[in-house]
Amino acid sequence: MKQLYAMQDATDTGTLQVNVTSRLQNTPIKGATIRLSYTGEPDATLESVQTDESGQSQVLTLEAPPVEYSLDSSQENQPFSLYTIQIRAEGYQPLNISGIEIFSTIKAIQNVVLTPLDYTGRFRESIDIPVNTLFGDYPPKIEEAEIKPMEESGEIVLSRVVIPEFVVVHDGPPTDSRANDYYVRYKDYIKNVASSEIYATWPDSTIRANVLAIMSFTLNRVFTEW
């Protein structure tokens, strides 16, 4: 059984900067208050800061496990610390984000979008970031053939391979028709998948190879029905 890293034994540090913008016109929010705590201990505030005129917090230095943990293929020790932020700003709905992963030597950037109080659409009051797939306990991925036959024209969705602006993400197994579909910007989707499947401490060439594989897999899904 994998053990959560004991924060009191942390020997290294990473950093975190929070960018806060408004849902309307994506404008920066000055004076937003950000309360930081360990995930699982939301009432024990470690630090409280405010955003500047650019909607950015100062860069916070935070405890993290040794960098060697993220380079160990056994994945026995948790290679990141988990933090929670509570964001409050006048005229906006409050938002809590938990599960922010902080790695040794790495600067993490957490983008936050706040919703105005008079907004009538749907919005989220809290976001729980799932633990990285390399360390978390997840069901095995559905196996697929490496080479698939192309026997019917209906299997091709587009006439050519394109880089889309948005992709549709089905939040559940393909067979679950009750799961929600979300429209996500392609660049954001690639970024989020990469950050949940690899570690930022890996060598640059390793990160690039994994990102290219994620891009190739995603574009194949867009081009075909698979």
Image: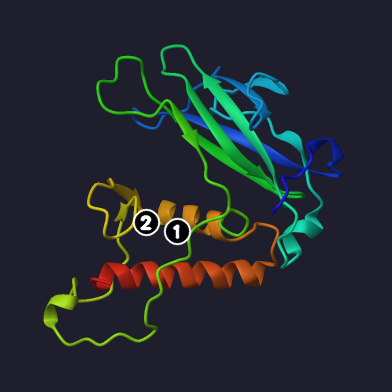
- Toward which corner of the image does residue 216 lie, by quadrant? bottom left
At which x and y percent is residue 22? 41, 27
At which x and y percent is residue 59? 70, 34
Q: Which residue is mark 2?
A: 186
x 34%, y 69%: residue:
219
Q: Which residue is mark 1?
A: 190
* 107 over 22 or under it: above or below: below
The quarter in which the C terminus is drawn is bottom left
At which x and y percent is residue 40? 64, 30
Q: Residue furthest left?
A: 153
In the picture, measured across the screen, residue 45 lies left or right of residue 218, that is: right
Identity of the amino acid at label 2?
A: Tyr
Identity of the amino acid at label 1?
A: Ile
* 88 over 7 or under it: above or below: above
Q: Gap between marks 2 and 1, in whole Å? A: 6 Å
The quarter in which the N terminus is drawn is bottom right
Numbered disc 2: secondary structure: helix
Residue 64 or 119: which is nearer the viewer? 64
x 42%, y 17%: residue:
92
| Marks 2,1: beta carbons within 8 A | yes
In the picture, measured across the screen, residue 217 lies left or right of residue 152, that is: right
- Toward which corner of the image does residue 26 lie, by quadrant? top left
x 49%, y 71%: residue:
212
At which x and y percent is residue 51? 59, 23
Residue 141 or 108: which is nearer the viewer? 141
Label 1: how many residues lie within 10 Å, few (<14), some (14-19) or many (20+)? some
Q: Residue furthest front?
A: 1
